[in-house]
Amino acid sequence: MENAEWLIEGEEDAILELQGRTYGTGDSGAPMLCSMVCKSLGRHAHVSRCRAEDALNCDDPEVEHIKQENALVEYDWISHKTFWARSDPYTHAERVDFELCDRRCGGEEHDPDLNHGALPSFCTLPLFHPPADLTDVPGLGHISHDGHAYTCKNPALMQRSFHIFFALDRSGSMTSTDHRPLPDTPASQRIATQADNRFGAVLSAVYNFWVARDAATRGGIAAGLRQDAYTVVFFDHTSTVACSSDIGSSPDDLLTMVPPDANWYGGTDYTTALKAIQKEMEDTWSTDRYPLVIFLSDGECTIHDDVVYDLCRTAVRLGKPLGFHTVSFGEQAGAQALRRMAAVAKDVFDEAPEDPLAPISGAAPCTYNEALDTIQLADTFVKIAKSLKNPRAALRA
């Protein structure tokens, strides 16, 4: 493969580890024997120059166009079958396997770093398939939120359940129209009719979170169940509990419970929001669920560390450490206080005794996040419940 170079799907710094070597986009394929590349990659795609007359309308079912800004040469991901159409050195069983989707289930039971001898669970559908029909669940398996079909149990149902406390800013600055609700979603028109502003952008992002979490936890053989409980607190200079420890409402039902718009005359008080969450947490505590706060604001406010420490230590005293995620929305957001809240929460979380039956793994439990626009805000809320992906990579001439 002396004249070939690697193309790695993802960001510019994405890498592929293969046979003890690490490759990035543009690295030479010389170390790899041509006849062994496919077997080394397992389920995979190849890359080839796009043959469509108009690359923007590349709709061949055997390929998936690679979107690149200002590309001098357009490329496609192509299937193994297409690449080796004239001469294929692989066995029939290997060719059949190479035709299947390369996405794998993200359940921890498939992670060899956590479970010795664990094997991956791959999607059972063809390589470039459309999203799976949610009503056509395989056997005892599940369909992931991003449309892949697996024969294993839904990892969301095998993981811990949460009591998620949303603290959402509805102060006067949230009436600004520099950011608006996401377009083209089932709830877009419904939200924009009453809140075509920053507050509406927050509602649409939270709605998408509910939909994503619903799909992740209601799919498969346990359809109809949601293990998580939701408490939603809106705040300006006062706080309002829109719903408390809700476990049965659909995303659309939850949307009917929230205020229609922000308070034009509202100030911003983080303390009253956290006090309301602490009261709700104490009143509705369940040993079956792990507490998690998602705190969003676009405003500037100060808060004493003691308020955050008191909330987090209350959770530890009740039996479980508190996960705490802050989200700064908009370019004028008061990031300093939100950063500090997440840092204080992390200090308490790290000092809390670990649950031996459900040790923390994966994503950090206490984080500060920035969302400068509606799309980033939606991505922040929906970055969970996605299938774990193999980094797609191939050699190109």
Image (cartoon, helix red, strand yellow):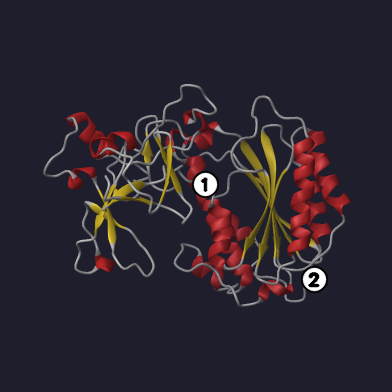
Secondary structure type for disc 1:
helix
CA separation, marks 2 and 1?
33 Å
15 horizontally vs 177: left or right: left
Q: Check the image and report above or below for 61 versus 153.
A: below
Disc 2 designates what residue?
A: 267
In the rendered image, residue 15, in percent from the top left (x then y), is placed at 45, 47
Please determine whether, in this image, residue 226 is positioned above or below residue 151.
Answer: below
Residue 132 percent coordinates (x, y):
34, 46
| Label drawn at residue 159 | none
Horizontal and vertical percent for residue 90? 19, 33
Q: Is residue 28 left or right of residue 265?
A: left
Q: Is residue 282 visible?
A: no
Camera-nearest residue between 387 and 20: 20
Q: Quadrant of residue 302?
A: bottom right
Q: Secondary structure at mark 2?
A: loop
Q: Given contact means CB atoms under 8 Å apart, are the residues at marks 2 and 1 in contact?
A: no
Closest to the observer: 80 or 203? Answer: 80
Residues 74 and 332: in front is 74
**What percent of the width, then of the height, locates residue 4?**
28, 50
Query: Which residue is tagged 1?
Result: 214
Could you tell me the amino acid type at mark 2?
Answer: Gly
Disc 1 marks a residue whose amino acid type is Asp
Quadrant of res 43: top left
| Residue 151 visible in the displayed image | yes
Mark 2 or mark 1, which has the lower sequence index? 1
The residue at the point 23 percent across, 69 percent down is 54
Identify the residue at image location x=58%, y=44%. 248
Q: Looking at the rendering, which quadrant does residue 35 occupy?
A: top left
Picture residue at 59% right of the left edge, 57% below the top: 206
> Dot 1, crowdedness within 10 Å: few (<14), some or many (≥20)?
many
